[in-house]
Every structure is written in C-alpha cells, then in structure tokens.
Image: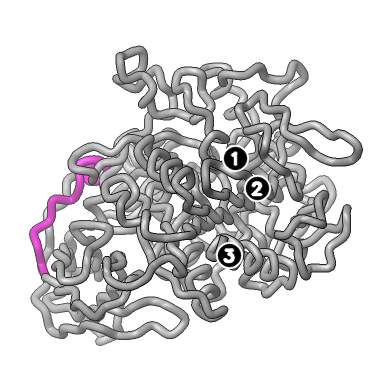
Amino acid sequence: MNESGNAWNDLHGAGAMEFPSGDRGTVELFAYCDRLSYARGEVVRLMVHTTRRTFDVEVLLDGEQPVPVFARAGLGGQIQATPLDAYQRGCGWQDTLEIPIAREWPSGFYLIRLTVADSDGHPHSREGGFVVRPGHEGEARRRLLLVMATCTYAAYNDWGGANAYRRVIGGKSIDGGAPRLSLDRPWARGHLRLPPDAPRHTDVPDLPPHSPPRYPYIEWALTHGFTRHYCDAGWAYYDRHFWNWAKSTGYEIDLLTQHDLHEQRDLMMRYQAMVMVGHDEYWTWEMRDAVDDFVKQGGNLARFAGNFLWQVRLEGAGRVQVCYKNPMLDPLFQSERASRTTTYWDASCIGRPAACTMGLTGAAGIYSRFGAVMPRASGGCTVYRPNHWAFAGTDLYYGDVFGGAPARIASYEVDGVDYTFRDGLPYPTCKDAAPAELEILAMAPAARGELRRHQGLLNAPLHEVESLLQRVPPFYDLPADGIERGAGMIAILESGRGTIFNAGYSEWISGLLHHDFFVEKITRNVLDRLLTN
C-alpha cells in the first residue's frame, strides 16, 4: 500500500526521480519499448534518449546466467524532447532502433542493456526490457505460467517525476501521486536490474527499544542513485528471483504480463497452473475476470504474493494506467460505470470484494516488520493445519513457526481475511466476502499502519489508512475499537473446477532466496500438486 512518503520527500527532495536535462555536459541514457510484451516474430520498437553521440545496445535473455541474443554498437544517439508531464502523457520520443524477435527465442524476460562512454572513456549503462510471450505450439499443461505484476510496476515507476505515491512540483517532491501514469517512459533505475547486495525489506534488523524506525533500503537507494521504490515493484526485485529458482529446481516456465491477461486472456487458458509472486497490488476488472474464468474452468492458481488491493483502469490503447484511489475524484464515481471506480476493491462503491478472486484481501493484512509496524516480529508464519498436503514432508507441527530469520517472509505487505478461532483453529468470518470454504493453513499478525511514538519519519502512518476508510468506507462494518489489527495468511480455496493456493506474503520469495527448507518444500508441494491435479 505504501501510501505516504511524508518527510522522506522533504529530506531528500526530488533527487531520486529521473528526468532528462538534455545537457551535453552530463551523461544521460534512457530508453523504453513501445509495448510490454511481444510474440515471436514481432519487432520491438526502442526509443532512446542520450546526450552522447553514440551508444551500444545488447539484448539478453535474463536469468541466472543471462544469454546474449542481439547486439549493435556505435548507434547514433540523440537528445529527445521530453514534456514535463511525461509521467502521465508519455515521453513521445522518436523511434531509435528496431529489435526483431527471432522465432526461436523462448518465452522470458529480455533485458536491454544500453551503454555509453563519458569524456574519459568510462562506461555508463542503463536498461530497458520486454517480455516474449509463449507461442501456441507444443504442450503447455505441464509448464508453469508466471504472470508479472506489471500494473504494480507502473504504479511505483517514478521516472519523469511522478508515480502513484508522489510527484515533483516546482522542483520539490510532495506527497500525493498522479492518478494517470503512462507506460511510454523508461523504468526508473532499479526496477529491471539490481546489484546482488541491494537491501531487501527483510534485511531490516529488529528495532532497538525506544528508537524511531528506519528504512535502510530507502537510504541505500537514495545514496546509490536508485529509485526509492526499487523494492516495491519490478522484475529485478521479485519475479526474476522466482524465475531463476523455478528454472534451477527443474520447472519449465513461461512468462506473461498482467496486461496480457487484460488484452489476450486466451494465452493463459492452455496452462494447468498460473503463478504470481511478490508485490501484487494493482489490478483491472478485466484481469480479475481472466483469473476467475481460468480457475472456474479448471486452471490452478499459486499465488506467493501480497497486497491485492486497488482497482485500476487502462486507457489510451492500454498505455495509460488510471487510479485515483479517492473515488470522489474519479469521473466514473456515481456514474453508470461506478463499479469501475479506481479505489480499493473492498470499497462499497465497487461491489466486488477482493477475497472473491484471490481468497485473501490486502485490506485485511497490509504490513509486518515495516518501519513502526511490528518492528520486532519474528517474520515467520505459524502453522495451524499441519496435516494439509501443502505441508507434506516438512515435519511441521501445530504451532510451529517457519520462514523466520534470516528469510523473514512475513515482512512488508501481506494479505489475509477477517477471522475467528474455534477449538484452536482459525476460520474466516466471511464478513469481508471471504468464501466459507476458505481453509486457513497458517498465519502471522499484521497491522494496517505505523504508530507515531517518536519524532522519527514514518513511511505508512496508520492515520492515512484510517482517513481512507473514513472517506471511502468498506462494504462491511469496521471494528469499533480501531482498525490497526490484521493478519497475513496462507490459505487454500477450491473455486469452480480449479484450486487457489494463496501464500499472502510479498516476501515469500525471500524464503526461496535463503533456501529456507520449509518455504522451498511448501512451494514445491504446491507447484507439483497444481501442475498435476
């Protein structure tokens, strides 16, 4: 959710937001593609801005060992005129290069590495990227389909001066995001490529007593010239790690974007199991329709992700993402299309609760081990139904906690439902439209925002969530004694002829990175079951 940046913006100004100056005395290099994904045989149109006379480009099939597939050197560079509001209307740059996609290129993420030299001959590089969609030949039923959370990518991309959380106005970064965000601009530094030592949300140590919270990943980003949102969204921080883990574990895997679900849902229907990972916050109505249809017709969904929360719309041939968050600012609010209002899914004005698609909802969880939210929690998840097939071979017992340090999978943003306990087991109350059949396997406490106990800076204060819920009430009654408490959960649901397994933790991937025995075994159990059942 990450609704606020407050004093961080005043402290650091607009330094981490990128925008071309066109000054030949500085080294600038930016690029973007005309689309997010392509079929084999199509052509990528690449738009490049640089202050250097020439540049080199290399395209690599990204992975544990990136594979070069295309290269050009000594291409003519040009300074491209860029509107000040490029973040919402697009850069409008001229085409610089066409990259043909060979028929033999497999589905995956292709990193475009651009390089220039400064006046002393030192190289400077930046990146772009695109997805090659799977073809229609061959058997896909036993292959995993990973769906990248590209709507969340777009929401956190602050290249050009704005994202869904903050904007630069008069040279100063202020709270309050832009409701319209264009895909026709580069990705901010850190969304597509990161050094291996980039801090994760899970790396934050326990907060010392009586200390203000800190955000080491933001400090690192601003110190090293990366977007402060690198750990909120992107191929480099989330999807790439799962892709590499799955490949190294022996799974065959293909790649689509959320935007492909919106526009070409037939591409997913050949698969038995679809996977989503990481921070999975923003969705369109049509994307939800695609997932619902997939599961009802017998497809299976494995979601290792958190924060399913906001509805967005796509406009401008799918190249502009719209999300007002406050529905009263949205032109569709109180119109005949009020259900498409861009705010959180559980708002009464939409009529489509989040739990109806994913089983869990971001509105019932939100944060753990984040700033001043549960800063000394274990980061682990407590088991309540150890006899479920998802835990087969783990040797986990009732009440065991797994995924704690160093992985700390219950960090950052998490999903859950309203629940109660009976005979020592958690059950959904269904007041938030969670299906009665939802089985809660494990869970961890969470909270909906940070409490201000010190003068330190807060990244997501609780009062902002309270303000949103007062302004835009949910369809269910809120507790009379406050809305701070939530939970992150692992749950399973049978829907139609398919199965939804939802580990509602955005940092589940950290368990795979740290080779946590329990996290890896559960992940394999789920994938193997959903690929064959």
Residue range corresponding to the magenta coloring = 84-97
- Between the residue at mark 2 and the residue at mark 1, the CA separation in whole angstroms equals 7 Å
- Between the residue at mark 3 and the residue at mark 1, the CA separation in whole angstroms equals 18 Å
Q: Nearer the viewer, residue 447 or 239?
A: 239
Q: Which of 148 and 530 is in front in this view?
A: 530
Q: What residue type is labelled 3?
A: Leu
Q: Nearer the viewer, residue 415 or 286?
A: 286
Q: Which amino acid does label 1 sit on?
A: Gly
Image: 294 above or below 40:
above
Residue 527 is labelled as 3
Mark 2 or mark 1: name the one nearer the start of the chain.
1
Q: Where is residue 441 in the image (x, y as percent from the top left)?
A: 75, 49
In-image side of 112 versus 496 (left or right)? left
Residue 492 is labelled as 2
Find out whether the residues at labels 2 and 1 contact each other: C-beta distance under 8 Å. yes
Of the 4 image quadrants, the one containing the N terminus is top right
Residue under the point 68% across and 75% down: 515
Q: What residue type is labelled 2?
A: Ile
Q: Is mark 1 on a helix, strand or loop?
A: loop
Mark 2 or mark 3: name the one nearer the start of the chain.
2
In-image side of 210 versus 356 (left or right)? right
Image: 297 above or below 253:
above
Q: Is mark 2 on a helix, strand or loop?
A: strand
Is residue 85 a member of the stretch shown in magenta? yes
Q: Is residue 225 in sight in this rendering?
A: no
Mark 3 or mark 1: name the one nearer the start of the chain.
1
